[in-house]
Image (tube, rainbow, N blue to C red):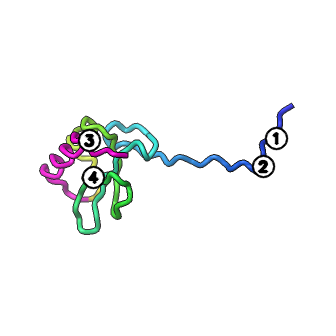
Amino acid sequence: MAQKQNSNAAPQKKVPVRQCLGCNEHKPKRELLRVVRDPEGQVSLDFTGKKSGRGAYICKDVKCLKRVRKSGRLAKNLECEISDEVYTNMERELAEGGDVL
């Protein structure tokens, strides 16, 4: 006969899941990197996940960032134009191992 679960046990928390714009895989939010367009219109990587503004998610992989750059999906998602310089800076930050999470 099946036993009842302990009513004092805390219910399991839901893990937030987001989709990578590069590879389209759904992954836990903590495994992805947030790209944010702040209220002033600046686009940058958000390693903390706490900056204010419109966000989009990519894997912590330069390959996914390059795919997003080629497809233009990030610009569509953030509803703004993104210059080549911004993409280059993001690629450099990502390659330098900014993913301290």
Tell me: 34 left or right of 88: right
Q: Position of residue 46 (x, y in %)?
A: 31, 54
Secondary structure beneath dot 2 equals loop
Q: Which mark is residue 7?
A: 2
How many C-alpha atoms fall within 10 Å of the one at disc 4: few (<14), some, or many (≥20)? many
- Which numbered disc flags the more N-terminal residue, 3 or 2? 2
Q: In the image, residue 91 lies at what x, y percent? A: 20, 43
Task: Work out whether 52 lies above or below 82.
Answer: below
Outermost residue on the top side: it is 1
- Few, some or many C-alpha atoms within 10 Å of disc 2 (few <14, some 14-19, many ≥20)? few
Q: Quadrant of residue 24?
A: top left
Point out residue 7 in the picture as x, y percentages from the top left corner: 78, 49
Q: Are marks 3 and 4 in contact (CB under 8 Å)?
A: no
As shown in the figure, which amino acid type bears the numbered disc 4?
Leu
Query: Which residue occupies the extreme bottom position in the image?
Result: 40
The alpha-carbon separation of the residues under discs 2 and 1 comes to 8 Å
Mark 4 to mark 1 CA distance (whole Å) = 46 Å
Q: Which residues are magenta?
A: 80-101
Identity of the amino acid at label 3? Answer: Gly
Which of the two labelled residues, at mark 4 and mark 1, occupies the earlier sequence position? Answer: 1
Cα gap from disc 2 to disc 4, whole angstroms: 42 Å
To which residue does mark 4 refer?
45
Residue at numbered disc 1: 4
Question: Which residue is label 3 attached to?
Answer: 97
Taking depth in this image into account, of 46 and 54 the one nearest to the observer is 46
In the image, what residue occupies the spot 33% across and 51% down?
47
Residues under numbered marks 2 and 1 in contact, where contact means CB atoms less than 8 Å apart: yes
Q: In this picture, is 63 found above or below 48?
A: above
